[in-house]
Structure formats: C-alpha cells, structure tokens
Image (spheres, rainbow, N blue to C red):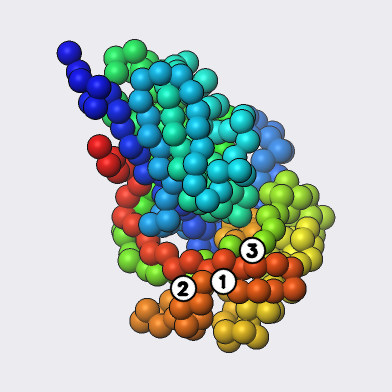
Amino acid sequence: MRDEKSLKALVRANAKLTLTLKAMPKIAEGPFMGYHPIEAEMVSLDLADTLEISPGDGFEVVGRYADKVPADNLVTKTFKILGIKRSVVLTKNIPPGGGLGGGSTDAAAVIRWAMKSGDRNLENAVRKLSDDPGRIALELGADVPFCIGGGRAQVSGIGEETRPKPYLFKTFLIFILPFGISTAAVYEKFDQLDFNLMDQVPNNLIDAACEAEPRLKHIIKFIQRKFGIRPNLAGSGSTLFYELVDNVDPAGGVTDLESDFGKIQILKCSTVNSARRYEY
C-alpha cells in the first residue's frame, strides 16, 4: 500500500516566453477553422507556479497573484477533461494575462503529473489526451502542448506542432506591466491590418497589440528612454522582455519602475532546459 506522502506530488509549472512570433491569417476550413496559425520559438523560464496535488477534492490558490485566478480555470478544467478529482493547492507566481502562459503551464503541469502518476485509473484518459496535441490546443489552449515538455522548441500550427531545439542558456529582463491585453482583441486588430506590410521579426503582433492597447506603445518608449533598450513583446502581450548580453543589466537591478500608467515590475529570469520536474 502506498503511504500518504507517496500519493502527493509538488509539480513545477514553468512560465513560457515567446521569443519570436509570426502570426498568419485565419485558417479558412478544417478543425482549426478561425484560428491563426503561427511560427514561433518558445522557451521555458525559471519563473514558475507550483501545484501540490494530493488525494481529495478541492482547489486553493495562494501566492502573489492568487486573487487573479478565477474559480473556473485551466487547472480545474484539465481535471474535468481527465475525469478525476484531486485536492490542489496552486501557488501563483506567474502573473496572469501577460503572455507568459500562466494558465497554460498550470494545465500542462496537471497533464505531466497524470502521465507520470502511475495511477492505472488515469492511463486511458491521459493517453488519449497526451496523444492528441490538437485536442489539447483546442480545449485547453494553444500554448499547452509546448508547456507539457517545455525547454526550447519551434512551435507551429495553432500551437499543437512542437519541434524541440537544443537548449541555450539565456537570461532576460521581464517587464510585467500594470495592465493586461486581451489576446482576442489583439487578433481582432491583426485581422484588420495588412498582413503583407507587417514587420515579420521578431513579433508581427506588436502593431496590433499597440492598436488594441495604446498604453503599450507609450511604455515601450518609456523603457527605451529610461534604460536605452528596446524591449520585445512576449506573444500577444502585455509582457515585454529584453535579452541580457554578458549578463549586463541595463536596469541596474531595479525591480519596480513607476510609469504614468502604474508600477512596472521587473524580473530577471533565465531559461531552463525542461519543464518535466517534480519536487517530490
């Protein structure tokens, strides 16, 4: 018989950072009709949520961003899809709504846990789900297939196609803005722009994001003036990032920055080579 501790798992859910992104016009037909295919490079960061999973039935959120997690969320949805119940304590360290995959990586952590739990009652449900990344992308989110494995990968399709790439250690400044940007609003603006005139590198959603949220353009310029750098947009935003060269920090260790639109949180994060980690 397995003891109480062996039935528990503390699973890390690493944030993802989209380094490059090329979004394309909507798919006109088929199972992904209405979605925008992408070509992107994504990496996992050492910034992470944690999920403590144990026998029982319940969901509790703690941590800095606990109040931002709705009752109906991707963790509870993933358990429903798997057809099981567990007691979960989610420690929320990744800011939601900023393009760092906070909800997606939590869902991926549940799938990863289920794949390795050794629970025979889960085998069929997990196998069906893990063998169908298209279903995962449609039901849980386009970033979830990448977040299951993490590391570094080229991501295409609507997010269901992931091709691992060799790990590279990199360090970034991550700028967490005082507002989020609706992904739906960004893609709505994207559809109104001339695709052929869009800047393709490193993120061709940036003009659409600035149209959807004009404060973004002002904050990019503010960071440029303050530190002499031009940050990139992470996914559809609102998070901005800047890769450090030779670990030189142009922000000089500043962790909070006051702007006209509120406080900008600055994190220093590095890449990790895999998201497949358990603590116990």
Residue 146 seen in the current view: no
Residue 212 at x, y = what percent? 78, 58
Q: Answer above or below: position of 149 versus 172.
A: above
Q: Mark 3 or 1, which is nearer the eye?
A: 1
- Residue at image x 55%, y 26%? 77
Q: Which residue occupies the foreground of this view, 216 or 85?
A: 85
Q: Mark 1 or 2, which is nearer the eye?
A: 1
What residue is disc 1 on?
Answer: 256
Label 3, residues with CA under 10 Å away: few <14, some 14-19, many ≥20 = many
Classify the position of the C terminus by image quarter.
top left
Residue 115 at x, y = what percent? 33, 28
Q: CA distance from mark 1 to mark 2?
A: 18 Å
* Three-letter code, disc 2: Glu
What residue is disc 3 on?
Answer: 177
Q: Earlier in the sequence, mark 1 or mark 2?
A: 2
Label 1, residues with CA under 10 Å away: few <14, some 14-19, many ≥20 = few
* Three-letter code, disc 1: Asp
What residue is disc 2 on?
Answer: 243
* Three-letter code, disc 3: Leu
